[in-house]
């Protein structure tokens, strides 16, 4: 059974940092078939794509809103995806979902972790 | 990148059909075959229902169908059932290694 379990969420002050993790199981995490993505959803709002990384970590892309502040990475030996978030702003407050190929037939989403940026 | 435009709400009685539109531009919906649709129940993670405009993942009922014409994609849910009541989002590849989602539509089963 495919599972994606996010962790690392919580309350952080504006300007602070946080690292999210996503533990993957039930599939070959390092397979070249899958890109991994982060998608976020502010409370009561819609979905927003944040970032993606290819299977070996050699290729990363970011939404303009997080470019230069967030870094996506992965450890295939640990079957884990990460999102390092720096210089956090109030508008980064959201549930962050870890997803495998979110827009594909093989797409799968974790249950999400809530980040609240507030003083 | 602006969000794709969806109607805020749609509704239908059990057994009826409902169609949701997703309007973008030639730089996203109109320019690529990578349009997907997601179902999200309250407090739950989204689930992909349609990918590549009209393809259904394994396990998704054939009551769900997708299409595209120009810059507008559509999701049709036929034979509405109570469990179809949820929020629905579209998404599209938007070029330049970027993706955009729709504004979301709340579907109510009357």
Image (tube, helix red, strand yellow):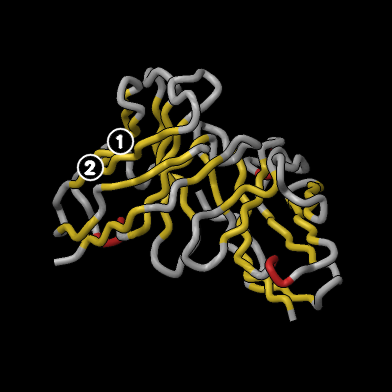
For the point 49% across and 45% down, the residue is: A109
Q: Residue furthest front?
A: A1
Q: Quadrant of residue B104?
A: bottom right
Apparent side of residue A20 relative to residue A95 in the rendered image (left or right) = left
Asked whether the viewer can see residue A107, the reply is yes
Say above or below: A8 vs B109. above
Tag 2 and tag 1, C-beta contact below 8 Å: yes
Q: Which residue is mark 2?
A: A19
Instruction: Tell me the quadrant of the picture where the C terminus of chain B can be found.
Output: bottom right
Q: Which is nearer the eye, A70 or A35?
A: A35
Say above or below: B83 vs A38. below
For the point 34% across and 46% down, the residue is: A6
Q: Residue B39, percent across and down?
A: 62, 57
Local packing at callout 2 (Cα closer than 10 Å; few below 14, some 14-19, many 20+) is some
Q: Which is nearer the eye, B94 or A11?
A: A11
Asked whether the viewer can see residue A63, the reply is no
Chain identity of mark 1: A
Residue at mark 2 to residue at mark 1: CA–CA distance: 7 Å
Chain identity of mark 2: A
For the point 20% across and 46% down, the residue is: A18
Local packing at callout 1 (Cα closer than 10 Å; few below 14, some 14-19, many 20+) is many
Sequence order check, earlier mark of 2 and 1: 2
Q: Secondary structure at mark 1?
A: strand
Say above or below: B86 vs B62. below
Residue A82 marker: 1
For the point 25% across and 61% down, the residue is: A116
Q: Residue A41, percent across and down?
A: 43, 58
Q: Residue B103, percent across and down?
A: 57, 62
Q: Secondary structure at mark 2?
A: strand
């Amino acid at each position: 059974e495919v599972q994606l379990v996010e962790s690392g969420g919580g309350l952080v002050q504006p300007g602070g940092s946080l690292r999210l993790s996503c533990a993957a199981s039930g599939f070959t995490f390092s397979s070249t078939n899958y890109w991994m993505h982060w998608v976020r959803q502010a409370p009561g709002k819609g979905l927003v794509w944040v970032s993606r990384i290819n299977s070996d970590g050699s290729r990363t892309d970011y939404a303009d809103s997080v470019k230069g502040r967030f870094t996506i990475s992965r450890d295939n030996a640990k079957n884990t995806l990460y999102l390092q978030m720096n210089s956090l702003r109030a508008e980064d407050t959201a549930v962050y979902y870890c997803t495998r190929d979110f827009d594909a037939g093989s797409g799968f989403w974790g249950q999400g972790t809530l980040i609240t940026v507030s003083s | 990148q602006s969000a794709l435009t969806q109607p805020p709400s749609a509704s239908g009685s059990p057994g009826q059909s409902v169609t949701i539109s997703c309007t973008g531009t030639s730089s996203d919906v109109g320019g690529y075959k990578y349009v997907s649709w997601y179902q999200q129940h309250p407090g739950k993670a989204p689930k992909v229902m349609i990918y590549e405009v009209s393809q259904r993942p394994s396990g998704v009922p054939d009551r769900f169908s997708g299409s595209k014409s120009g810059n507008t994609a559509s999701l049709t849910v036929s034979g509405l059932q109570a469990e179809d009541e949820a929020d629905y989002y579209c998404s599209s590849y938007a070029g330049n290694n970027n993706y955009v989602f729709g504004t979301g539509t709340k579907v109510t089963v009357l």
